[in-house]
Image (cartoon, grey):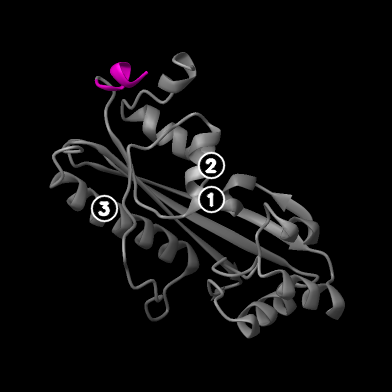
């Protein structure tokens, strides 16, 4: 397998997120390097949720691509990045780090619908950029105070946009979902694979070379 990899184009995932890595691995894609981009993710004044998702994905991809270009082991490679934004109307919910933040998000989401946007950006070895925006609509059940308290105690919300993880305990809150499930987890797989394959990355390489 290692010898076969030598002719495959290199791929960088511009993220340190275990969720995004696991999602790529789920569809048989193994990045050659993880290069998280340290960016200020604060929305600009009056910035719409969908615009924020696309902008941050692009900035992450471009920042990681510059770092990769200077590394001899990567050089001219593909760089993929994603950013996920949870919103109610035009209100962008935070990536929660405090229990109070998470509690406020869960009370806001309780019994109502919200939207999840993911921007995906791909930088090709020739420096071209391709982008996608994916939208998913999610409706929560009405949450009791006890459910919110128990979920806060679990700690699963930490670092999650909107204060919940659909792939974990938070999945029990989802009454309805319209659109891409993996988008809500953190990386829409159909669109990501389409971007890579459309630009010539051998997306099925590992499918054909399974050990």
What residue did someone put label 1 on?
19
Bounds of the magenta span?
1-6
Q: Residues within 10 Å of mark 2 (few under 14, many from 20)?
A: some
Which mark identifies residue 40?
none
Look at the image and say whether residue 4 sits in the magenta stretch. yes
Determine contact: label 2, label 3, CB under 8 Å: no
Asked which secondary structure carries label 3, the reply is helix
Quadrant of residue 157 within the rendered picture: bottom right
Determine contact: label 1, label 2, CB under 8 Å: yes
What residue did someone put label 3 on?
64
Quadrant of residue 31 within the rendered picture: top left
Residue at 70 percent across and 49 percent down: it is 178
Q: Residues within 10 Å of mark 3 (few under 14, many from 20)?
A: many
Q: Main secondary structure of the magenta part?
A: helix
Q: Earlier in the sequence, mark 3 or mark 1?
A: 1
The answer to whether any part of residue 180 appears in the image is: no
Determine contact: label 3, label 1, CB under 8 Å: no
The answer to whether any part of residue 128 appears in the image is: yes
Q: Residues within 10 Å of mark 1 (few under 14, many from 20)?
A: some
Q: Position of residue 139 (x, y in %)?
A: 75, 61
Q: Nearer the viewer, residue 31 or 83?
A: 31
Q: Nearer the viewer, residue 74 or 189?
A: 74
């Amino acid at each position: 397998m290692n010898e076969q990899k030598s002719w495959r184009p290199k791929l960088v995932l511009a993220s340190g997120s275990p969720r995004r890595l696991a999602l790529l691995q789920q569809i048989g894609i193994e990045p050659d390097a993880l290069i998280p981009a340290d960016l200020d993710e604060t929305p600009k004044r009056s910035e719409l949720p969908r615009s924020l998702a696309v902008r941050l994905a692009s900035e992450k991809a471009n920042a990681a691509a510059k770092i990769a270009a200077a590394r001899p082991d990567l050089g001219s490679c593909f760089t993929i990045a994603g950013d996920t934004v949870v919103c109610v109307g035009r209100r962008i919910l935070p990536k929660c780090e405090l229990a109070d933040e998470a509690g406020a998000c869960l009370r806001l989401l309780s019994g109502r619908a919200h939207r999840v946007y993911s921007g995906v950006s791909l930088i090709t070895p020739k420096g071209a950029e391709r982008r996608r925006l994916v939208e998913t609509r999610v409706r929560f059940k009405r949450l009791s105070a006890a459910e919110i308290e128990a979920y806060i105690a679990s700690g699963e919300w930490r670092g999650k946009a909107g204060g919940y993880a659909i792939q974990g305990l938070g999945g029990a809150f989802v009454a309805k979902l319209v659109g891409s499930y993996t988008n809500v987890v953190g990386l829409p797989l159909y669109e990501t694979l389409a971007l890579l394959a459309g630009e010539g990355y051998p997306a099925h390489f590992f499918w054909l070379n399974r050990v």
